[in-house]
Image (cartoon, rainbow, N blue to C red):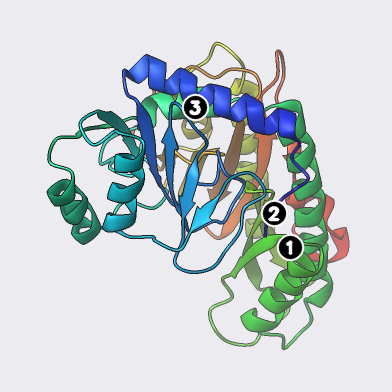
Amino acid sequence: MGFEMYSQDERSRRWALGRALMDAEGVEALLLYENTYFTCGPSGAIVIFPRDGRPVALTDGPSSSPWVPTRPSRHAYGIAEVLREHRLHRSAVGVLGLEPYPPIHRGPLLPHSLWSQVLGLLPHVAFTSVWPGYFRLVVRHSGEELAILSEGARIAKAMADAVADALRPGTHESELSAAGLSTGYALGATPTVRVSAGGGPISPGDVVPVEIRCTYGFLEVRGRIPLMLGEPTDPVADALDRAMAGYAAGLRAIRPGNTVGQAAAAVAAQLGGPGDEPRLVGLNPLSLSAGGQEPPTGHDFVLAPGMTLALQAGHRRVTVGGTVLTTEDDAIELFTPFTGVSSGSTCS
């Protein structure tokens, strides 16, 4: 889906960031694998962004973008053709999609066969990875992006409500997933619902972990919900209290000036026992991750206003989580499904 909801001013802002990245990295163009930031879609394209012109989206077939021209040439020869047209076949080109190191680029990576062909066709191009610089430029959201995130959070909340409303004795994972997915699609998002009920019918007393992910306007919000039929048992209630305490500790630590590592450590300090699951994930773009007792990737990255992160904390099968936005002061919770869905069918 092309999101014409983004204005031409937003397009100009992003293209200026792209050229600033080229300046900082000393390159004359960007090659971005399956990236929509500078094109506003389509989602599977390879994007060539020359310093002296508009980006071009290379696609598998006929397609369109609200911002840039598209070509049905998503292959190595298409990449070489565009670079030669702009006389960049002997220049330095920054690449997004080669990143095997922290901060981890959890988006698509260039296939080896494709990249080998590109190198063979363009032996005189100096390709260099630009992921860390790209991340630092795009991680802080504009006003338009924050409005899109707010709408995405509203849709995610509706998905969570639909999943909770569908919970009945004898229901299966597929029925709960279908309820959330149909709601997300109907509201114009690209949704993901993951339900872990063990495969069988759900019975009173079962704890049903649910993960909601909602992509809207190419930005993502996500959350974790512990659903349950009936009143929680004492062990479940204790696990929920423990998870909530870990979440609260992480929320307090997500402040400008703290590093990702410090925020992740705050969750781990509260949840440091067997069966605990602390996790902090950077969203939009997804790149920073901390889970369990392992050091987070990009642990030294300093938090700044305008970033979104997924924060979750769990004990055994009871996990709570949401999406938070950094501000000049305390973080804002954009999506908190574990407190937002019906109290009659959740662990709350």
Residue at position x 70%, y 78% from top?
Answer: 178
Q: Does residue 248 show up?
A: no
What amino acid is found at the position of numbered circle 1 in the picture? Answer: Pro
Q: Are marks 3 and 2 in contact (CB under 8 Å)?
A: no
Mark 2 nearby-residue class (10 Å; few <14, some 14–19, many ≥20): some
Mark 1 nearby-residue class (10 Å; few <14, some 14–19, many ≥20): many
Question: What residue is pinned by disc 2?
Answer: 237
Residue 139 x/y as whole percent: 55, 28
Q: Does residue 219 show up?
A: yes
Q: Nearer the viewer, mark 3 or mark 2?
A: 3
Q: Are marks 2 and 1 in contact (CB under 8 Å)?
A: yes
When the figure is inspected, residue 232 is found, relative to residue 261, above or below; the finding is below
Residue at position x 57%, y 63% from top?
Answer: 63
298 left or right, relative to 163: left
Q: Secondary structure at mark 2?
A: helix
How far is disc 3 from disc 2 in space, using C-alphas?
49 Å
What amino acid is found at the position of numbered circle 3 in the picture? Answer: Gly
Question: What residue is pinned by disc 1?
Answer: 232
Residue 297 x/y as whole percent: 36, 33
How far is disc 3 from disc 1 in space, using C-alphas?
51 Å
Residue 315 x/y as whole percent: 54, 51
What number is the disc on residue 18? Answer: 3
Residue at position x 33%, y 19% from top?
Answer: 25
How far is disc 2 from disc 1 in space, using C-alphas?
6 Å
Q: Nearer the viewer, mark 3 or mark 1?
A: 3
